[in-house]
Image (cartoon, rainbow, N blue to C red):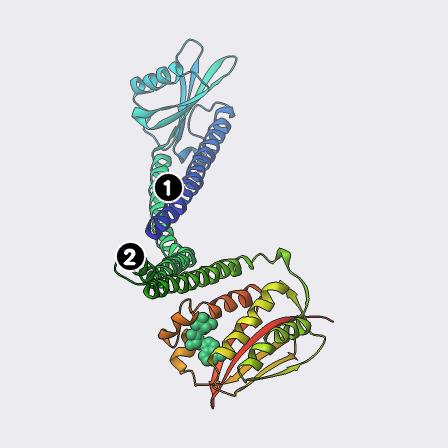
Amino acid sequence: MIRKLRLKFILTIMVIVLVLLGLMLGLVLVFTRAQIERDNIQMMREIALRPRTPALPADSSDMNLPFFRITVSKEGEILSCVGGYYDLSDEELLYGLIEAADSGEGETGTIDSYHLRYLRHERPSENVYVFSDITSEMRAMKGLITSCVLIGLAGLGLFLVVSILLSGWAVRPVAQAWEQQKQFVADASHELKTPLTVILTNAELLQNGGYGEAEHARFASSIQTMGQQMRGLIEEMLMLTRADDTAQTKTFQRVDWSNAVNDSIMLFEAVFFEKGLTLQPEIENGIFVRGDGTKLRQMVEILLDNAQKYCRENAVTTVRLSRKGRFALLEVSDEGEEISAEDLKKIFRRFYRVDKARSMNHSYGLGLAIAERIVTAHKGKIWAESRNGVNSFYVQLPCEAN
Ligand code: ADP
């Protein structure tokens, strides 16, 4: 799919470039040719309007140019020929040229077999024919056409290279999104496979005879547990999808960030207390951000939930919110097993768990991925640090003025 997209991109650019180059070079050729022809005919007209001279005038330097003029009486007799550039002694040839010029429709035209352009000018008592050699004009045009073709080919080659490079750059986000999507489907299927296998096996055992009531109850309970686990996973996957929708910043509002964090802390106070853990808030009041309040609270709850899940016994979890210049910095730190530098880089990935065995315990490795999506959609930054047995998660969001 990505290859096809890249190919289409290159093809589109090349067609546009081909049309544009063709049009530009074509116009250059047409206008240059018209200009040369116009200048040439103008010169011929000037020569035609000069009074007849029986011989070559001394100052007619332009007559040495590739022009010659024949004046013919109304009866068709050649009265004079002027043109230093040519040998005009062959009268038969001159009459042939006059005849060819007369057979043409307009005032001007070309005699291709002689590479000549003519201009016919009628006077009351005589007709004047001016001829011009267009060999050099044709050669110049040929040279120009060759140059245009070469420039066109070089331009096409250059744009081909540029479009190949550009296409790689342009489709990279699509390729990444595509890869992520594939990885997500693969991971989600893998996560759903285990509980589904357990459910199917237990359902089969339930159908088979030969088991007592106690076993039946155990099989049913396993099915229920696995069903709940699947529901939990699906709910988290839906949450992740909705976190992607947060990117639509149109719905963002001014959020009292201090209040939102306090609300989330209140929700978790009982959970921490039940487990014998300490939750220690240090919240600076009056910090506002722009965003989706519900999603931001959801993000704080993910961090608090992780803190109570992964901290050691009797640990203290500190939640700090303070203003740091133009930003609001939220810190959720708990005392727990150190996260290695390697794992710190990966924990925000979808389905990544440091302890793989925890999946049975409603830990699917999606929480931090959801949190990261929400923070990124709010133009913020989220990162984790682990030092001296304290695991800290930081969220930096742009502040709104009070
Ligand atoms: P889940 O908690 O569902 O496994 P998360 O994406 O929230 O998924 O977390 C990913 C992993 O990061 C967890 O499995 C855990 O190993 C690690 N982790 C997250 N928060 C903490 C924390 N506060 N302390 C220690 N490890 C953590």
Q: Does 122 sit above or below residue 355?
A: above
Rendering coords of residue 23 (x, y %): 43, 38
The answer to whether residue 91 is left or right of residue 43 is left
Which amino acid, mark 1?
Leu
Query: Which of the image's four quarters has the C terminus?
Result: bottom right
Q: Is mark 2 within 8 Å of ligand 1?
A: no
Q: Secondary structure at mark 2?
A: helix
Q: Secondary structure at mark 1?
A: helix
**Mark 2 — residue?**
204
Residue placed at 46% from the left, 80% from the top?
Answer: 310
- Counting residues from the start of the chain, the first of labels 2 and 1 encountered is 1
Residue furthest to the right? 402
The mark lying in front, picked from 2 and 1, is 2
Residue placed at 40% from the left, 83% from the top?
Answer: 340
**Mark 1 — residue?**
144
Rendering coords of residue 94 (x, y %): 34, 20
Rendering coords of residue 291 (x, y %): 63, 64
Rendering coords of residue 330 (x, y %): 59, 77
Residue furthest to the front? 212
Q: Does 59 sit above or below residue 109?
A: below
Q: Is residue 347 visible?
A: no
Which amino acid, mark 2?
Glu
Residue furthest to the top? 75
Q: CA distance from mark 2 to mark 1?
A: 84 Å
Residue furthest to the bottom? 388
